[in-house]
């Protein structure tokens, strides 16, 4: 990492403990990830992965320590500013993709417009971005208005990627997105994810318990048991 | 996409459970509005059944009973009034007019009432309205008859048609006065009173058909229609009679005099006050019904609350996704409030539609069975208020699942616990 470039994700002596519990769920001494880098977070279930994701997305605040994203200390933002920050700078891909079944493909990608006060200009840009992104992901125009329930797994993956990237986020968080996929689909999905994050120069935080994927990433952290960095 | 559209699309996706919720709200709204409409319409129709009549006189009985059989044609008189007593009272100085009525026969489910042509002049209903003829004119001959609007409509009669009157209130071949048919000379306008369901004939006509009957059984005489006219057709008794006084201020004195009539035990009632008094007895029931329907509504709202709370579990995934793309917890609460609002407004709309459907269906039945005319009125301020409070109450209640969702979305964040 060149010393001049500011890290996109910066964790400094971060701990998180649920109220009433005797030990930390997450404890990370230090973590810095630069622009466009790919981080693999490895951990078994119950190791605090999800809590870490909620911390990175600004849903939870650390009990001690600081988390800065793009130079902004999340703890200094009000809750609604943090929600806004997340909408603008962070994309999330879930396990099983979690498209909203009652929306069309295009609506799934542009649904964030329901929560933000946007000008008509912004809305049109969002729609244009969404269409461009979907088309570049090989989802042809005639599919855009179709309900997502009718899509194949591969198509659903791509819609989920498009939804996460449509706002042009600097950080993409993927939570076990490959756990339900077979080996072929998994590799293809990773190729897609790498290609798209590279083209947007987007930092990827990829969480998985699957050690086979480790070799493809720049950085690896491992969460063990209580979530300490090993 | 707006938040509202997102809420509607999501609701449509879960329509099965929501449709049932809408229905349960609709039914309770129908019930609540229905009770209110029926009591108002019932009261309006009931209290406007008779006006301008100062006293109704019949054989001694309770005021309500006399009112019900003489005006509403519900139930039967315990006894008759002799013609002599009627003539004595009719001749009193303070009496302006009297109209005798004689009940007991029927025609295909409709009551037959013997009276005099004065009935058409003096019977008043509603806000001082009088009977009017849609076609034809009052009866003149012994075998003439005038039909109420519903009788003519339901049985398809026109001027000149002949009808057979049955003895008593049950129509059988055995008990019909089939040797003395009546000819329709007039059909009345609709009045929304029991008159609409009445067949009106002259007192002489009633006498004529009963000449060859004794105590409910046909005697051997078997007179035909023309032969009967040879007899004296002045009745020996009548069921009741209506009285109009010259000076309304003396009504109570006339009433007391009649109640103390020496020749025969009689009861005189003031129709207006008896109607009002009777309505007051009924209104206890009506208030009870209203309270019951409020409870039904509360049950409906709790059912809605249960449904929405239980959908929160299946919506965890959805809520996490929305949080991830930047939805604030307040927006999640808003989604749930909007959905509830949608459900309860739909419930009100369906409920009102159901109400009008039921009123249209049940109206004729209520008219026939109870003599109460229930129209299709526009919803009034009270009913509007009822619906506004239903909607406001439901919205307030939706803050409970809203709050649960709020707490959860803060706690769960992006993690999806299914």
Image (cartoon, grey):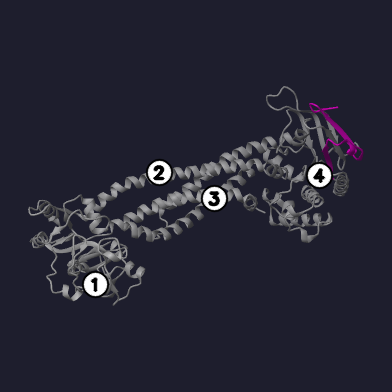
Quadrant hosting residue B358: bottom left
Name the residue beneath numbered marker 4. Answer: A170
Name the residue beneath numbered marker 2. Answer: B291
- Residue B338 in view (yes/no): no
Q: Do the residues marked 1 and 2 share a common chain? A: yes
Q: Secondary structure at mark 4?
A: loop
Position of B259 relative to A83 (above/below)? below
Q: Do the residues marked 1 and 4 share a common chain? A: no
On whether residue A228 falls in the magenta region, the answer is yes
Name the residue beneath numbered marker 1. Answer: B179
For the residue carrying disc 1, how many other residues have a C-alpha within 10 Å: few (<14), some (14-19), or many (20+)?
few
Sequence order check: which comes first, mark 3 or mark 2? 3
Quadrant hosting residue B237: bottom left
Sequence order check: which comes first, mark 1 or mark 2? 1
How far apart marks 3 and 1 lie (CA) works out to 60 Å
The C terminus of chain B, quarter of image: top right
């Amino acid at each position: 990492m060149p010393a001049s470039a500011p890290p996109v994700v910066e964790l400094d002596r971060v701990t998180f403990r649920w109220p009433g519990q005797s030990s930390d769920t997450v404890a990370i001494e230090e973590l810095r990830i630069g622009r466009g880098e790919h981080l693999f977070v490895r951990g078994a279930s119950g190791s605090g992965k999800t809590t870490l994701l909620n911390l990175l997305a600004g849903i939870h605040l650390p009990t001690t320590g600081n988390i800065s994203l793009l130079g902004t200390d999340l703890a200094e933002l009000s809750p609604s500013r943090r929600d806004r920050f997340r909408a603008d700078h962070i994309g999330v891909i879930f396990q099983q993709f979690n498209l909203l079944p009652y929306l069309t493909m295009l609506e799934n990608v542009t649904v964030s417009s329901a929560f933000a006060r946007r000008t008509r200009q912004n809305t049109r840009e969002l729609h244009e971005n969404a269409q461009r992104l979907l088309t570049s992901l090989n989802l042809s125009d005639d599919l855009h208005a179709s309900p997502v329930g009718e899509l194949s797994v591969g198509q659903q993956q791509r819609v989920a990627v498009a939804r996460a990237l449509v706002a042009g986020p600097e950080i993409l968080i993927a939570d076990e997105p490959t756990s339900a996929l077979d080996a072929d689909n998994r590799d293809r999905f990773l190729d897609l994810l790498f290609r798209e994050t590279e083209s947007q120069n987007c930092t990827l935080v990829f969480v998985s318990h699957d050690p086979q994927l480790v070799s493809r990433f720049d950085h690896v952290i491992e969460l063990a048991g209580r979530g300490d960095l090993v | 996409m707006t938040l509202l559209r997102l809420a509607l699309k999501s609701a449509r996706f879960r329509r099965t459970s929501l449709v049932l919720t809408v229905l349960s709200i609709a039914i309770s709204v129908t019930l609540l509005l229905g009770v209110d409409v029926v009591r108002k319409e019932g009261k309006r129709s009931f209290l406007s059944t008779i006006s301008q009549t100062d006293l109704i006189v019949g054989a001694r009985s309770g005021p309500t009973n006399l009112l019900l059989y003489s005006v509403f044609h519900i139930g039967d008189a315990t006894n008759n009034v002799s013609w002599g007593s009627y003539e004595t009272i009719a001749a009193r100085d303070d009496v302006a007019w009297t109209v005798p009525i004689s009940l007991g026969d029927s025609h295909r489910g409709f009551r037959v009432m013997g009276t005099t042509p004065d009935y058409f002049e003096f019977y008043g209903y509603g806000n001082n309205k009088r009977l009017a003829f849609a076609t034809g004119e009052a009866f003149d001959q012994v075998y003439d008859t005038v039909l109420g609007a519903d009788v003519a409509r339901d049985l398809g009669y026109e001027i000149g048609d002949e009808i057979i009157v049955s003895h008593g209130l049950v129509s059988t071949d055995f008990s019909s006065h089939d040797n003395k048919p009546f000819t329709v000379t007039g059909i009345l306008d609709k009045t929304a009173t029991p008159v609409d369901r009445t067949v009106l004939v002259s007192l002489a006509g009633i006498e004529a058909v009963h000449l060859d009957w004794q105590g409910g059984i046909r005697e051997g005489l078997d007179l035909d229609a023309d032969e009967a006219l040879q007899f004296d057709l002045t009745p020996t008794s009548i069921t009741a009679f209506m009285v109009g006084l010259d000076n309304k201020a003396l009504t109570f004195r006339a009433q007391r005099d009649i109640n103390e009539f020496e020749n025969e035990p009689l009861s005189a009632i003031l129709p207006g006050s008896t109607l009002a008094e009777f309505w007051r007895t009924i209104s206890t029931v009506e208030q009870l019904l209203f309270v019951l329907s409020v409870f039904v509504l509360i049950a409906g709202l709790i059912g809605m609350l249960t449904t929405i709370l239980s959908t929160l579990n299946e919506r965890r995934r959805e809520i996490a996704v929305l949080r991830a793309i930047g939805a604030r917890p307040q927006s999640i609460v808003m989604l749930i409030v909007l959905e509830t609002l949608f459900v309860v407004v739909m419930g009100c709309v369906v409920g009102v539609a159901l109400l009008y459907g039921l009123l249209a269906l049940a109206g004729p039945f209520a008219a026939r069975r109870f003599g109460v005319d229930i129209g299709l009125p526009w919803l009034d301020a009270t009913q509007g208020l009822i619906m506004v409070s239903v909607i406001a109450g439901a919205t307030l209640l939706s803050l409970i699942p809203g709050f649960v969702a709020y707490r959860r979305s803060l706690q769960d964040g992006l993690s999806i616990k299914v």
